[in-house]
Amino acid sequence: MLASFLITFREALEAALIIGIIAAYLAKIGRKDLYRYLYIGIIGALFASTGVALAFKLIYGELEGTAEELFEGIAALTASAVLTYMIFWMASNSKKIKGDLQEKIDVSISEGQMLGIAALSFISVFREGVETVLFLGTLAITSPLDTLLGFILGVATVVLLSFAMFKGIHRLDVGRFFKYTSILLVLFSAGLIATGVHELNEAGIIPPVVEHVWDLNPPVNTDGTYPALHENGIIGSSLKSLAGYNANPSLTEVIAYIGYWLVIGLFVYRTYRVTAASKVGEVKSYGS
């Protein structure tokens, strides 16, 4: 449940952040009358995202055996690819997203293309909706009820936060928000990579090379229940959903997981370290 809560919270919060920026700017320029286009985009995106979720469920429900494992593996790797794209996108656009949104709103209003505002809100919400479907879809395969509860709690938390956030949206450090959520995204994405490789091992598409590099699973309890640190136990299953934890991974899983952290994790670290260093330099030059 923790993983689905964090994923939903993060995705819904990003959508709320962008919608909040648009709404705050419209209020600032005295065009609250255009809120209806904002609402049109949001409602349309919610319906479209629901359609994607139903399609995902319909396709998965028809599969079994190797086809099911193949689908799970591809879904996990696709979700990881989308997450990785978002990590790169945020690293490149975190400092200018607010200005870009305001510029697009100005263009839409000046050209009389009010549906452009609806399109902005639609794309913002639908993108996060599709990402949520991909991520939660892979979690729901193994724990549907926990995934649903986490989703509901995540949405409810963001709705409550949104009211407070809207009041101070102009003071929000968007760059810092994306910086810290990028770290969370790397954690999720690395886990999805490992999960995808594991499923493709099971489907016989990717060879495990070594089936179990290690096995950290403690013995099952005498009453048939799992110890907390077992990958099917309370702690182990949470780590599995959150970060792709596997107590007895194959060699290809380990290589994929560590390789992802080395490449993408290092990219995120270096990108935001350079950004922080440049800010320090700006402050020093300003002080002198």
Image (spheres, helix red, strand yellow):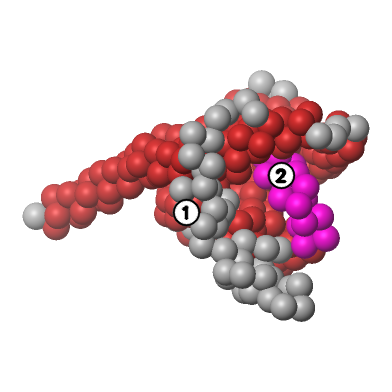
Q: Residue at x 76, y 52 (%)?
A: 142
Residue 208: image location, x then y, percent: 53, 35
Residue 178: image location, x then y, percent: 48, 49
Q: From the viewer's perspective, is residue 109 above or below residue 155? A: above
**CA neighbours of label 1 inside 10 A, class few (<14), some (14 to 19), many (20+):** few
Along the viewing direction, whichever of 287 and 188 lies nearer the viewer? 188
Q: From the viewer's perspective, is residue 68 above or below residue 16? A: above
Determine the residue located farthest toward the top in the rendered image.
111
Which residue does the numbered mark 2 point to in the structure image?
138
- Foreground: disc 1 or disc 2: 1
Q: Residue at x 90, y 32 (%)?
A: 62
Q: Is residue 274 rendered to the left or right of residue 209?
A: left
Q: Amino acid at mark 1?
A: Trp
Q: Residue at x 57, y 36 (%)?
A: 197
Q: Amino acid at mark 2?
A: Thr
Determine the residue located farthest toward the left in the rendered image.
288
Q: Is residue 23 rendered to the left or right of residue 244?
A: right
Give, as a single range, the part of the protein colored magenta: 131-148
